[in-house]
Image (spheres, grey):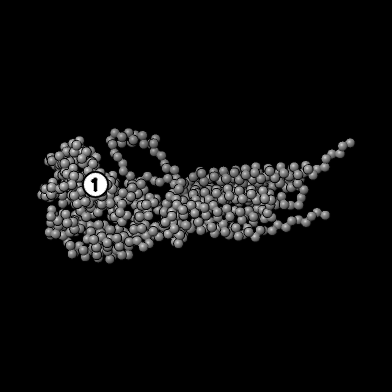
Amino acid sequence: MSPPQETHRIPAAAPALVFAGVVIAALAWLLPVSLKSVSKGLLRSAGVGTPSVAAFGRDLVDSEKLGPSVLVLDVARGVGDPRAPALERAVSDLSSRQPSLVAWGGWDPSLDPLFNLRQKTERASSTPVVNFMIPEHARDTVRAYLVNSGSLGVQAVLRTREVGATGRFVPATRPGGQPLDALILLTGLLYQGEHLSPTLQRELRTLAEGAAQRHELGDLEGFYMDLLSLGRRLDWTQLTELMKRTDSVRTVGEYAHLCRVAPDQLPYIYTAALMSNSADRVAAYLIQYGKAGSEDLRTALGDGQGAVNLLLQRGVPVNRAPGPAMGAAAALVLEHPRLMLSVKYAGYILGLFLLLRGLDLWIVTPAGGTSGAGVQQHARAGILAVVMSALLIVATEPFLLKAAPTSEYRVRLAIPMLAATSTQSEPSQKSKPVTMETSTLVSIGIFAALQVAMYMACLRKIREIEYQDLSPLMKLRLMENEENLFDSGLYVGMMGTAAALVLQVVGVIEPNLLAAYSSNLFGIICVALVKIRHVRGFKRRLILEGLKMTPAPAVV
């Protein structure tokens, strides 16, 4: 009589492992932290409890800084701040109470002796500060005031009036040099009134002293040109508030460039510089990301000052993909971003490991196995968990493999000879940035999941044959009978490639050969693992066991 067949029971831990794996992976996915982007939910959490755009503008009104508050009011309206009407009433009330200061954008005690700010004027709106500096009488008054300054930096700036070697400007002391003279005096006023950041003061003084020694403006002329661009768009108070938050001549040039290429974005760019207290970060962010960065900055402005600071500190784009987020974990993410990112990725790996291990016990080897087989199963589940976690990370990180598009705001230096040369060679040098669309990542993930399912089905069949109460040679015949199943990974891979190519032709997914041929690649890997790693070793063991059971031939 043959021994009774072993009853296959599902281990009680298998469903628990599957459930725990799904829960841990889901909780990791809900964490609002990313590697190369910041989620909209995290921006909202960062903005909670911080001043909104309208609240920030009201603080400016209370400080009697009318010009900056007008630009902030435009932003408050643009982002739909509910307190924008209250800010508008506050700005209107301040304007009616101080009508003579509207043109200057606010009160400055150092300018009152020079321009008599409280006198009635026909200018009923914010006026670019350059307009006040062009008249000869105004320049003579400012020059007489600055000549008596005890600041070495102011004196160095004034000495550049005598420099005759200029490039784009007419020298200040010659006929037609009024614009350069006005800009030199404007720079002296900013320096004298301590309206420049300390680092910008030191840099300007160094440039001015070098220009006076060489009798050539050099790089200082670029600063004067950039100051002209800003001075034609901002009033006095708006300009001084921006210069206090600008740390380098380069940032002044970047802001002037942004004003020229994106004039409609000036209120947003200006407000972000004041709210973050750093014009340098705002300029660097917009120069890097262009129009997309401008939209991200606008989104952060709508969430408040904390969101603006977070976006500029991280220096990454906003992930606009919809998805849930754990609000309770937002505080930890804001406090420890790198630690929480590590926790998220570790959660992916641990959750998928438990899920695969539970499925292995539930489907592939429900009857258990030897200790050696258990070690192999743990290793197999760990490797698959790492691979699937990598695919999951790529699928949930839209900016991880996608190359950043060329910024529309990037500063370009135009040199006639180089420009002509580059134009002739443009067709051969032009290249398209490598990108990977979300549909491509989804396709690759589906093909990988199909092959994982085929891999587990093959392992289950091998274990089913192994646990049957049959002779080794009979088990060997059954294994040969399942060759088509062991080769099914190739069939599924070819069908996936064909389906992907058809979907690309009809326009359902983005054209990308990687998405199509990845199905074949995964199929080859699956079949290679099954037949070389498992089938070959099992058949070898069956052959050896069959030879041991075969009686030796009788010796005559």
Q: Pick whichever, 110 or 555, lies toward us.
A: 110
* Residue located at (20% from left, 57% from top): 105
The answer to whether residue 532 of the structure is visible from this angle is: yes
Q: How many marks?
A: 1
* Residue located at (31% from left, 34% from top): 418
On screen, residue 412 versus residue 519, left or right, reads left
**Occupied quadrant, residue 429:** top left
Give the percent coordinates (x, y) of residue 108: 18, 56
Give the percent coordinates (x, y) of residue 269: 30, 53
Give the percent coordinates (x, y) of residue 109: 17, 56
Give the percent coordinates (x, y) of residue 320: 42, 55
The residue indicated by pointer 1 is 201
* Residue located at (20% from left, 53% from top): 236
Q: Pick whichever, 455 or 507, lies toward us.
A: 455
Quarter of the C terminus within the rendering = top right
On screen, residue 385 versus residue 324, left or right, reads right
The single residue placed furthest to the front in the displayed view is 150
> Is the residue 170 above or below the residue 61 in the image?
above
Q: Pick whichever, 439 or 330, lies toward us.
A: 330
* Residue located at (45% from left, 48% from top): 400
Task: Give the amino acid type for the residue marked by disc 1 in the picture.
Answer: Gln
The answer to whether residue 508 of the structure is visible from this angle is: no
- Secondary structure under the numbered disc 1 in the rendered image: helix
Quarter of the N terminus within the rendering = bottom right
